[in-house]
Amino acid sequence: MTSPPETVVTVGWIAPMALELAPALAVLEQPTTKAVPGDDTLYRVGRIGGHWVLMAVCPRIGTHPANTVLANMRRSFPNIKHVLVVGIAGGMPYYGPSLQEQIVLGDVVVSCPQGSEGGVAHYEFGAWEVEYRLTVSGHTLHPTSALLTALKRRNARGIKATREKDSPCIHYGTIGSANTVVMSSAKRNDLYRKYQIIRLEMESAGVISEYQGLVIRGICDYADSHKSKKWQKYAAATAAAYAKEVLLLVPPAKLDERDRANSFCHSSSTAVVLRRAPHALQDLVENFHRRRKEIGEFGKKWQWHQQELRRFFESSLLKVLEARSVWLLVDTLDECGKENAVDLFQWLQSLLRMLPPTGSQCRICLTCRHYPILSSYCGFEICPELENGQDISTYVRVKLSESHDLTASPIPAFITNGASGVFMWARFVVNQVLDLEREGAELKEIEAAVHSTPPDLDELYRGLVQHMGPASIKLVHWICFATRPLTLDELIWAMVVEVDCQHQSLKACQSLRNYISDKNKMKRKVQTLSCGLAEVTPSPKKQVVQFIHQSVKDFFVEKGLFILDSSLKSIDVAIGMAHHRLSMICIRYLAMEEISQSTSYEHADFPFLAYVTTSWDDHGRTPLSWAAEKGHAAIIKSLLDTGKVDVGSKDSKYGRTPLSWAVQNAHAAVVKLLFDTGKVDVDSTDSVYGRTPLSWAAENRHEAVVKLLFDTGKVDVDSKESVYGRTPLSWAAEKGHEAIVKLLLNTGKVDVNSKDSKYGRTPLSWAVKKGHAVIVELLLNTGKVDVGSKDKYGHTPLSWAAEKGHEAVVKLLLDTGKAGVDSKDICGQTPLSWAVASGHEAVVNLLLDTGKVDVNSKENEFGQTPLSWAARNGHEVIVKLLLNTGKVDVNSKDKYGRTVLSRAAENGHEAVVKLLFYTGKVDVDSKDSCGQTPLSLAVANGHEAVVKLLESAK
């Protein structure tokens, strides 16, 4: 595959080591190698979703090499907007008391901003002052808003993922970055205590200190003396998989005219300032010549990056202000798009704050439509509508100056006064007056027309569009609902091809009366069909068709579509019908003979093809589908009465029928209307998840709709979706929908032990996990459920209930006598182990009361017993419960050779240490595999009270 041009790449992905690049390449689509002249880095580039992603490996570990790679990357690929550092790192084993705050090998840690700090701390900025102490004086920038939004959408803020045994858990917090490998648990723990650093690595600070980005690391060791390479490949893979998941939630960056306008704003303003300060040019010129020599021609091989332009501007401005005052004018700020506008506005504010209080003044003037970005603006404001009467008067007089009779009459004054400061109104009326004058109308007739023109823009638009014909309506649909502005070449074919077109070839379509090959004629046709509300932008390279003002589009979308078609009863249906029509036009174009027979699709031959192939899917909803989703029963009835709608049609994007949409949104009246046609497939599955209408209804608690589906007698009550293999009962049980569970069970046709294909959980397991005791009781009362069923992680319903602390559910399960009280999952954890680790005292008590649990069972990962878990987490009451059994081994060692006392001492749990002392059985001087005693661990972690206890015991 040919590599894409540098300008389309919007994501930079840095893999610090080669082993971290391999899994990264696995998540790329269309991967290819790319070399840039003058850049020593060999890049890999490919797609993830809608993004072109650039990947590079650092030549060696450390913050400085990473910074160099990113600098090269940003220089060679100027449109990179998002930066990711993805790879492996060492982590804190625990950063809180709960199970969700346990980091196990293979987990993923993501940098997350904490207050004003960006999520990555560069602790090498300071120095180790004394043993086990350090100073951090550097923090990085926040990630971009788009990346943060993606994290929020994945419940990043303050929410920890639930561990699914062998699935990695995602953690969010501060990352420590330095040029030094940490192989000391004491230093690692000190970093956490002082700065809440939960992961350690060696590259990110060099990258994120200068650029807004995100750091994603898989945990391969615990940054202690037990370093091993065993988990590196797995950890690298989990990090890459999560990074891909995040990018799929980030909207693709749009490199359109607004981005170019934003860059032009910075480059042109810098040029203006530099003309006034030639002495400030030296650095810029030297930089320019060096890059041109190393990389190649400017504009083709490289471009200035926005941040560079800003720095040039700031330094140049400071030098200019040494000699003179500066006025900075920024026109039409809103035209560069909301995100760019906000960013530019905030930068200008920070620019003013950084200027020295003495010296010449810098004044900034912004022009902008009424826009929320200026709500915090502290300067004074001028509203043109209140101040531009004289400007409008001048405009009117100049436009009417070709007619002496008009300028000598009171008509110019009538127009100026009637405009009330709105230039758009004056423009329309002036054009109307000139048309009447050319037609030979008398002055009194023209005056009457001016006075009869509605003063409100909406009313003016309404009057203009009332007599629009079918071709005008089609043009409005394309301008309003195309996924992007159409070029003039595209519009020519968009207007000539129709849904019911009789011609089979593009050549035959050229014989139609409405085919216009001459672009100038097409421009005039656009103005005529739109009644002057649309225009073709006068750009020689790419002429696009658009409305003359945003208020025109707002008018059509909010009310104008009703005016164009009085039979419409809902704006949703109007939009749906428009999209459906555009979708069918796209499909009809694709079916033309020349396209189906061609082997080379050149833009010159098929100018409409690029739009059609990328956008037809976005238009693929029928009016019936839209109305069904919104619950417009009256409109559904009207559409059905036409006899022309296909009630079983599926939309192209999700493959869902109108019934599926109506059921999911609980529109019972619409469901009845669709059933009355006798033509709906009640078990039709969508193309994304393979779910039936009943599956959607069961998940969303729509009891009335479920009954309607049952009444058809045609519904498969035990159907399995194709993606996750879940049944309606599985969904209803998880969501706690008691009435729907009863309905399903009463059919006698559901498999109560059916397992989904993703987790291998039964409906009972789902209900237990969520703590729905009523549902659990309903399922148990069938007498058919397998109470000890294990999911793919070996988790039984009882172990889920124990982990989650659902006391009432635990009682119900234990009362069956079939719950598998001491059953182990694939990690070797029993229900007791889960309950202890999670701190659920009541559940621990219930399990111990059975007399059937092994209180000394060890889990596989760390080799810890329930007592070790309780001691480490400081659960004093649970420690007492376990000790009171008289069966626990208080000197049991985990895989690191640490005893229960060592774990309690290490984490500073004084009360637990005392309880263990009271047994009179603990070995105070036991050593772990590194020779550390409980006392040395307490000393290393600064737990003074525990140190005193241990010293007194000697």
Image: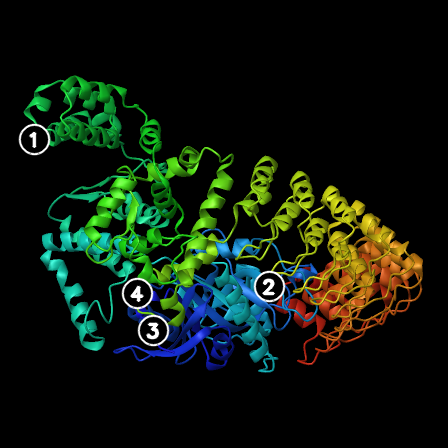
Q: Which mark is residue 600?
A: 3
Residue 931, quarter of the rendered image = bottom right
Is disc 3 in contact with disc 4, using a CB cutoff of under 8 Å? no
Q: Secondary structure at mark 4?
A: loop
Q: Position of residue 209 (x, y in %)?
A: 39, 63
Which mark is first along the chain, 3 or 1?
A: 1
Mark 4 burial class by Cα count in 10 Å: few <14, some 14-19, many 20+? some
- Residue 78's tag is 4
Q: Are marks 1 and 3 in contact (CB under 8 Å)?
A: no
The residue labelled by disc 1 is 402
211 sits to left or right of 261: right
Element under disc 1: loop
Q: Residue at x 43, y 56 (%)?
A: 142
- Front residue of 507/773: it is 507
Residue 827 at what x, y percent from top left? 74, 73
Label 2–label 1 contact, CB within 8 A: no
Front of the two marks 4 and 2: 4
Report which residue position mark 2 lands on.
170
Q: Nearer the viewer, mark 2 or mark 1?
A: 1
Quick one: label 3, few (<14), some, or many (20+) residues within 10 Å? few
Residue 42 seen: no
Q: Looking at the picture, how far across and down is residue 783, in whole percent? A: 92, 58
